[in-house]
Structures are given as structure tokens and as C-alpha cells.
Amino acid sequence: MEATSIVFSWPTIGWVVVGLFLGIIAGALPGVGAALGMAIVLPLTLPLQPVDALIVLVGMYSGAMYGGSISAILVNVPGTGGSAATTLDGYPMSKKGQAVEALAISATASAIAGFFSVAALILLSPVIIELVLAFGSPEYFVMAILGLALITVVVRGSIVKGLTAGAFGLMITSIGIAPNSPELRYTFDSLALYDGIDFIAALIGVFAIAEMIKLSAQKGGIAGEAINMSGSALSGVRTTLSHPIKLLKSGFMGMFIGAIPGAGATVANFFAYGEEVRSSKDSESFGTGNPLGVLATEASNNGTIGGSLVPTISFGIPGSGATAVLLGGLLLHGLRPGPDMFEGELATTYAFLIALLIGNIFILLVGVFLVTRLGILTKVETNVIIPMVIVLAILGGYTLDTNWIDVWTVLGLGVIGYFMVKYDYSIIAFLLGIILGEIAEENLMRSLQLSGGSYDIFVMRPLSLLLVIMILVILFGPFIKSKLKASFNN
């Protein structure tokens, strides 16, 4: 009840709308998307109350998930990774004169699936609260190591490159004053480095600057041809509502995949699409403009939002770039993921979940009633986007602590981030390293102080022992599985 009264008070309810509106625009602009849009806005939330700031960020996350479908459907360019599979049937629908219908399906599916996944998360929160409150320093250390072990799972391509990116993130966290001791590390006698490298400045760099360098190679607008906004929005809404089972199945599939750190909306998007094709009696029609293909993919990517919040606010393990920025928002406003989010800050946690529920209604209204005017977003030229984003990124870096080292961090890691993307070094692995390094080191030191220097504390408690076993399964499971398979084949 307290959280509801917070959300419906002024100006908080206004920030719900602002966040969603900014998110829809960021998602509809290919090359911007949820993570970059949130990273740009993050430093600008400093003057806001913590709950208002988080509502803006989580609203942008939700809005961008829907906004990504606009360019995916209209010009075959997904605004976000979570809308990649939407192009498979969304763009063919546009070419058949059903663009508005496809956008209406996207809005309705996103809103309903997002609403029910967040509602399910609120209902499950008592169980989550009990689990989180059972965690102490040993469990948090092992949980951080589990998050680092997930690098081997989330990395696409070379495992060596993924581990290198993760190690680079860990290395950055070792700069500055050591936790629980006055020792200085890698500061080179510079007072500006005593507090280390700011995680949020690093986020802004690897998302904003790196993406703009990449986008600078593209000339003109995103859309290369005229966009035909035709079709019926009412027909799209009717199509979505006539398949409630498929809608909820894809939404909850997205929720459970989203709760797995590193999986994210892109995985859920293709997983839900594949399941819809598999279960359909008319699988041959997919890829040629089947409305159910759009319904499944858009229900799943908004469903991931509720699921992805679980590891982020409970354990500080982000499952995607967008949740990494959201985690940065928590830390920037003095909120620490973990037990405090379910005790002293419980009203704040419920407030942004309720804001997500309201936001899904806003997405439905915008998608259905303003859908014919959203095509203009895909025509914005890159030479307008790039300077705006770079200026906002640098200003955002400086306003974090009015420290020039943050500006150099933004620029330096922006260039490094560009080359990481170019040569297939995982950005998510890097972010896991930079986020979890400090959590792991701090809780390791605290745990060893509690145990008098004995490492037995990490296996003597049931919950930490279970997490250790999970780490071993993640690291050695694939090798054991391949050995067993080879022995059975012989």
C-alpha cells in the first residue's frame, strides 16, 4: 500500500510516463536501444529521489523493449537485440501492407505479457525475500564467483576471449583503495584514482561512445526507403487477444529465461519464436508474415523484464546490459542489491514493480493510438544522433562526481569497448567482471575475518555449499558430459 501511494503521487507518476516515453524512443532508434539510452540518462537522474530515478530507468527498460519492435517491423532493423526475431515475420507483414497491424500486435503482446510477468514476480516476492535474507557474506562471495563462472555460459564464440574480457573487468576493480584495508593499488600517486574507476562511467563509455563510433560508419537515416504505414490497429489487438494461451506461454517463457543471468531478451526472443514454430500446425507460414510470430517474440522480450530484475536486485548480478545500467542506478542512489532491498527499502522495490505494471498500460495506449506516427523515429539521421549522444555521455560522466578522471574513463573505455565489439570480446563478460569484482573481494575479506582466516566457511554452510556445487557443475559439466558421451559412443 505504501509503494502504491508513492507511485500514484506527483511527480512520481509523471516520471513513469517520462521513462517509458524515453525508452520507446531509444528502442525505436537502431544503434541506441535500452542499455545505451539508460546509460545516457543515468547521470541525469542524480537530482531525483532514489525511487523516482529507478522508476525512470526501469520505465526506459520496459519502453525500449517495445520500441525496438518499431524499426524491426518497419525497416527490418531491430532497435534492440530483444527484437531481432521480430523482424522474421514483422517486416514481411509490413511489406504485405499490414505494418500498423503488426505494430498493434507488438504493443498489445508486450503490454499484456509484461503486466502478467511483473504481477507474477510481485506474488513470488515473499519467497524471494526469504531466500535473499538467508544470504550472508560467504554466500554473497560464492554467488559473485557463480556470476563470474557464468561467463563461460553467456559468451558466444571464443571462451578465451570471454574470460579475457571478464579478467579485464576484474582488473579495473582493483584500482584504488583496497576494501577493509588502507592499501593503495595502481593509483600512480594520483588522488583522482583513490576511489577507483567509477562503474557508471565505464558503463557509459562501453555503451554510448563505443556504439557511436560503430554507428559513425553508417550514413543517412536508418530507413533507406519510404515507410508505408498501412493496416488496422484494431485487427492487431483482436489477433493478440484471440490467442491468450500463446501470449501467456511466451510471456512466462521470457520471464524464466530472463531470470537466468546472461540469457536476456535476445535468447528469450528466439526461444519463444522457435517454440511457436514447433507447436504450430502451419509452421511453413512463419517467416512470410505470420502474426503469431510477432506475438510470440514481443510477448517474450517484455516478459524477460520481470525475470531479469530478480538476480539484479537480489544478488547484484545483471543478466544484460540494460540491467547492468539499472544496477548502476541502484548504486548511484545509495541502494545496495541484496537483503536491504527487501527490508529497509522494500517500499522502493515494490514501487518500481508497480510502476512497471502501470507502464505496460501506457505502452498499450501509445502502441495502439499513436502507432501510425512512430515511423518517423526510424528516419532520424546518424549525424544528428551521434553528436547528441557523445555530448550527453561526456556531460554525464563529469556530473557523476565532478571528477575529470570519469570523463577520461568514458572516453578511454569507449574506444576500448569499440575494439572489444569489433573483435568479438564479450561486453557482458567485461561488465560481469567489473560489477562482481568488488562484491567478491569485499565479501571474501569479510568472510575470512568472520572465520579467522579459514576457507571452510564457504563449504560449511548449506546454502554456500550448494552454490559451490553449482559453480563446479557450470565449469566442469560440459567437459564431463563430452567425456561420458565419448565413452558411451565407444
Image: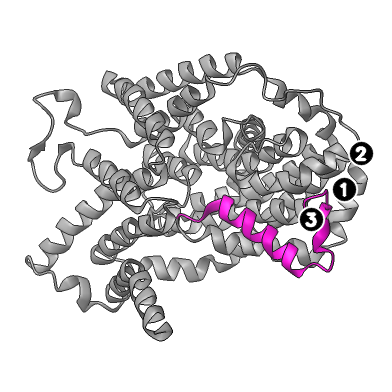
* Residue 449 seen in this snapshot: yes
Is 285 within the magenta?
yes
Give 33 or 55, whichever is nearer the viewer. 33
Please give the residue where the numbered disc 2 appears in the rendered image: 231
Is 78 on the left or on the right of 48, as rendered?
A: right
Q: Secondary structure at mark 2?
A: loop
Separation of residues labelled 3 and 1 (CA atoms): 17 Å
Image: magenta residue range: 262-291
Separation of residues labelled 3 and 2 (CA atoms): 19 Å
Figure quadrant of the C terminus: bottom left
Q: Which is in the foreground here, disc 3 or disc 1?
A: 3
Is 357 on the left or on the right of 94, as rendered?
A: left
State which tag comes first along the sequence, 3 or 2: 2
Figure quadrant of the N terminus: bottom right
What is the number of the mark on residue 236? 1
Please give the residue where the numbered disc 3 appears in the rendered image: 286
Is the Cβ of the residue at disc 2 closer than 8 Å to that at disc 1? Answer: yes
The residue lying at 80 percent from left, 63 percent from top is 283
Task: Say which amino acid is labelled 2.
Answer: Gly
Task: Say which amino acid is labelled 3.
Answer: Phe
- Residue 104, given in percent of the width and then of the height, sits at 82, 44
Task: Say which amino acid is labelled 1.
Answer: Gly
State which tag comes first along the sequence, 2 or 1: 2
Is 137 on the left or on the right of 263, as rendered?
A: left
The residue lying at 71 percent from left, 43 percent from top is 87
* Residue 303 seen in this snapshot: no
Quarter of the figure with residue 178: top left
The image shows residue 467, relative to residue 324, as above or below, that is below
The residue lying at 77 percent from left, 34 percent from top is 74
Separation of residues labelled 2 and 1 (CA atoms): 9 Å
Near mark 1 (Cα within 10 A), the count class, few <14, some 14-19 or many ≥20, is: many
The residue lying at 56 percent from left, 48 percent from top is 352
